């Protein structure tokens, strides 16, 4: 279950001016059928953070927070059918652009500068590889051991931005 106080703090990091400009740009509240874009965003973020598996889990989880809805900036919890409808019909570009705008906004606000690397003249990259286990009965092409499946994720991170600059996935044999 998601701690609503922490969830509210995470939501407070989202600049509502940026969000509202994107809503206007894509006119995503034009035919919103009672569930506006902010409620949709809160629902999807709740889904991710609570590891919800269905629209029923999202709807019931948000409904259980009825006393704290104002802290999340929503007036009512969306029903299962409303969530299904808005997931199908709302323009996904709103959320894509929100991600990039928030990334830029938060990065500029809290730009980490590491003093120990200031004397280096070249850009610093971090390289990592990790094995991601897979269910062999579902991903039979990813056979790793006799009873396990896996893929290997090779990543190069830009040290300044902590963002991947290269990602490659291979099947582990």
Image: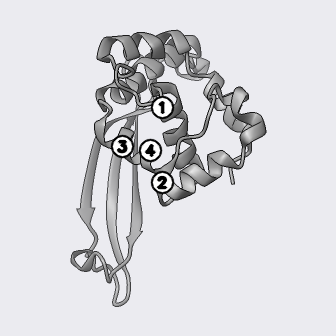
Residue 25 or residue 101, whichever sits in front: 25
Q: Earlier in the sequence, mark 2 or mark 3?
A: 2
Q: Quadrant of the N terminus?
A: bottom right
Secondary structure beneath dot 4 equals helix
Q: Which residue is mark 1?
A: 35
Label 1–label 2 contact, CB within 8 A:
no
**Where residue 34 sits: x, y (%)?**
48, 30
Please tell me whether residue 159 is drawn above or below residue 142 in the rendered image.
above
Give the Cα separation between the discs numbered 4 and 2: 7 Å
From the viewer's perspective, is 38 left or right of 163?
right
Q: Earlier in the sequence, mark 1 or mark 3?
A: 1
Q: Which mark is residue 83?
A: 4
Give the Cα separation between the discs numbered 4 and 1: 8 Å
Please tell me whether residue 144 is drawn above or below residue 168 in the rendered image.
below
* 10 Å crowding of disc 4: few (<14), some (14-19), many (20+): many
Q: Which residue is mark 3?
A: 85
Residue at image position (41%, 23%) is 98
Label 4–label 1 contact, CB within 8 A:
yes
* 10 Å crowding of disc 3: few (<14), some (14-19), many (20+): some
Label 1–label 3 contact, CB within 8 A:
no
Label 2–label 3 contact, CB within 8 A:
no
**Where residue 172 sits: x, y (%)?**
28, 71
Secondary structure beneath dot 1 equals loop
* 10 Å crowding of disc 2: few (<14), some (14-19), many (20+): many
Residue at image position (38%, 82%) is 148
Q: Quadrant of the C terminus?
A: bottom left
**Where residue 42 sits: x, y (%)?**
55, 34
Q: Which residue is mark 2?
A: 55
Give the Cα separation between the discs numbered 1 and 3: 10 Å
Give the Cα separation between the discs numbered 1 and 2: 14 Å
Give the Cα separation between the discs numbered 3 and 4: 5 Å
Q: Is residue 129 visible?
A: yes
């Amino acid at each position: 279950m998601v701690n609503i106080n922490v969830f509210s703090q995470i939501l407070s990091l989202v600049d509502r001016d940026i969000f509202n400009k994107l809503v206007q740009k894509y006119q995503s509240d034009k035919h919103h059928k009672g569930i506006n874009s902010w409620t949709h965003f809160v629902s999807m973020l709740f889904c991710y953070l609570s590891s919800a598996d269905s629209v029923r889990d999202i709807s019931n989880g948000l409904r259980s927070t009825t006393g704290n809805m104002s802290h999340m900036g929503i007036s009512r919890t969306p029903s299962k059918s409303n969530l299904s409808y808005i997931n199908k019909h709302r323009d996904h570009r709103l959320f894509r652009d929100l991600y990039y705008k928030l990334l830029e906004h938060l990065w500029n606000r809290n730009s980490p500068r590491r003093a120990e690397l200031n004397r280096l003249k070249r850009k610093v990259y971090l390289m990592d590889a990790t094995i991601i286990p897979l269910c062999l009965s579902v991903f039979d092409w990813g056979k790793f051991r006799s009873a396990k499946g896996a893929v290997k994720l090779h990543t190069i991170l830009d040290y300044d931005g902590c963002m991947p600059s290269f990602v490659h996935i291979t099947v582990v044999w």
